[in-house]
Image (tube, rainbow, N blue to C red):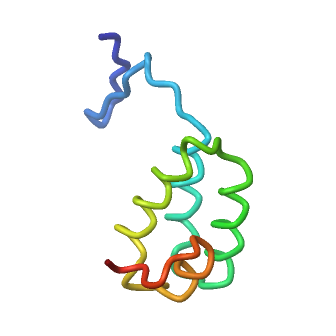
Amino acid sequence: MDKTCYNDGSSIDQNFIPTMLDHQKKVLEEVGNNKERFKRELIKSLQWISSREHTQLKIWVIKNFCYKYPDIISRIFKIDTACT
């Protein structure tokens, strides 16, 4: 496995190619403290990722944000309760 090492001791796998799903998770983490931006970015995320990745994003969003935005998550993913 090829890795690039940085001065701070961290490294990155050079074979790792980020997907749109990875990118959108990062965006959602960055806007996670702003309810309106989170909602807007979640909607955009679902438009940009593949249908196969929708389920993965849904699971990730519920795991990471259901405590904060259950109403948004329930509405966007059309589920009764986001935190189950």
As drawn, the residue found furthest toward the left would be: 9
- Could you tell me which quadrant the C terminus lies in? bottom left
Residue 38 higher or lower than 23, as above or below: below
Residue at image location 49% in from the left, 53% down from the top: 55
Residue at image location 55% in from the left, 64% down from the top: 28
Left or right: where does residue 60 sit relative to residue 36?
A: left
Residue at image location 63% in from the left, 45% down from the top: 51
Residue at image location 64% in from the left, 41% down from the top: 50
Quarter of image, res 27: bottom right
Residue 64 or residue 52, whichever sits in front: 52
Residue 83 or residue 4, whichever sits in front: 83
In the rendered image, residue 63, in percent from the top left (x then y), is placed at 34, 67
Residue 80 higher or lower than 18, as above or below: below
Residue 48 higher or lower than 36, as above or below: above
In the rendered image, residue 47, in percent from the top left (x then y), is placed at 74, 54
As drawn, the residue found furthest toward the bottom would be: 71
- Could you tell me which quadrant the N terminus lies in? top left
In the rendered image, residue 17, in percent from the top left (x then y), is placed at 52, 25
Quarter of image, res 46: bottom right
In the rendered image, residue 81, in percent from the top left (x then y), is placed at 43, 84
Residue 33 higher or lower than 48, as above or below: below
Disc tally is: 0
Left or right: where does residue 24 sit relative to residue 1?
A: right
